[in-house]
């Protein structure tokens, strides 16, 4: 089962995509979002080489620490451990949470007991499996249509999100097409929070957008 003793102390989960930053430096966009109140950032730049990703992760680690925010690395356990990230986020074709915990034990990770594991899910069964395998939280979606999540199938909708929230016992973050105009509806399902890319990364003023989003879900 998931480590229910680990507190997930954030509601907005920012996922990076530098290609949506409209030519701005990703680090500048993320820092602006952190100034607005984001407390968790997932580095997800799948087209970068290992070296490029590692260098970006180091820079993001420094910025997130400055704002007392958590840093998650998508899939790359080695980079997460090396830059002392707060956790890892796994896809359905990645390691299992059990595998990650084994790696943490083998490497004698100093903060293994606090290391958080998130898992992307797109169905109730995947959500149940993630909980059983030891995930600390999941993302579930796409709730609404979004181009970046279209390959995962049709939107699951708010009712399916509500079913997942009621069925599993670890925090659920809605993902996929979450915007300022619908985040309140998403949170009303009982979801712990929302994972977002474009609404924040592509925003003209990320800091202002984050503040508006947080105001909607308070």
Image (cartoon, grey):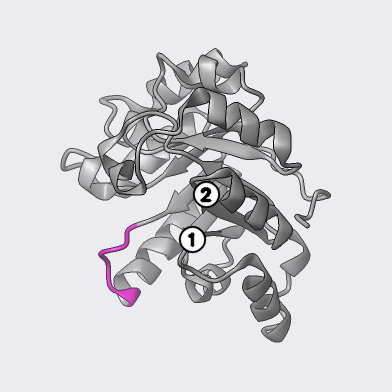
The count of marks equals 2
Q: Position of residue 99 (x, y in %)?
A: 63, 75
- Residue sitting at the far bottom: 106
Q: Is residue 122 visible?
A: yes
Q: Is residue 218 left or right of residue 176?
A: right
The N terminus - image quarter: bottom right
Q: Nearer the viewer, residue 39 or 74?
A: 74
Our reading of the magenta stretch's main secondary structure is loop
Residue for point 57% across, 52% down: 126
Is 47 included in the stretch rendered in magenta?
yes
Magenta part of the chain: 45-50
The C terminus - image quarter: top right
Q: Is residue 192 visible?
A: no
- Residue position marked by numbered label 1 in the rendering: 92
**Mark 1 vs mark 2: which is more N-terminal?**
1
Q: Position of residue 128 (x, y in %)?
A: 66, 50
**Above or below, 159 relative to 176:** above
Q: Nearer the viewer, residue 105 or 144?
A: 144
Is 123 included in the stretch rendered in magenta?
no
Distance from disc 1 to disc 2, alpha carbons, whole Å, reads 7 Å
Residue for point 83% across, 49% down: 5
Q: Secondary structure at mark 1?
A: loop
For label 1, the crowd category at 10 Å Cα-Cα, with few meaning under 14, some 14 to 19 and many 20 or more, is: few
**Above or below, 53 relative to 18:** below
- Residue position marked by numbered label 2 in the rendering: 121
Q: Secondary structure at mark 2?
A: strand
CB under 8 Å between callouts 1 and 2?
A: yes
- Residue sitting at the far left: 23
């Amino acid at each position: 089962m998931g480590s229910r003793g680990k507190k997930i102390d954030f509601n907005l989960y920012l996922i990076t995509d530098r290609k949506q930053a409209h030519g701005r430096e990703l680090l500048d966009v993320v820092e602006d979002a952190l100034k607005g109140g984001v407390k968790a950032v997932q580095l997800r730049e799948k087209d970068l080489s290992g070296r490029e990703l590692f260098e970006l992760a180091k820079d993001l680690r420094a910025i997130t620490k400055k704002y007392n925010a958590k840093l998650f690395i998508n899939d790359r356990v080695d980079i997460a451990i090396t830059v002392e990230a707060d956790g890892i986020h796994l896809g359905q074709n990645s390691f299992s949470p059990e595998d990650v915990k084994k790696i943490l034990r083998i490497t004698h990770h100093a903060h293994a007991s606090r290391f958080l594991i998130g898992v992307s899910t797109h169905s109730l069964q995947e959500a149940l499996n993630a909980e059983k395998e030891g995930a600390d939280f999941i993302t579930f979606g796409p709730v609404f249509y979004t181009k970046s999540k279209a390959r995962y199938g049709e939107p699951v909708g708010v009712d399916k999100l509500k079913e997942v929230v009621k069925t599993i016992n670890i925090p659920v973050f809605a993902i996929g097409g979450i915007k300022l105009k619908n985040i309140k509806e998403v949170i009303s399902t009982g979801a712990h929070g929302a994972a977002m890319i474009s609404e924040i990364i592509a925003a003209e003023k990320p800091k202002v957008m984050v503040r508006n989003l947080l105001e909607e879900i308070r």
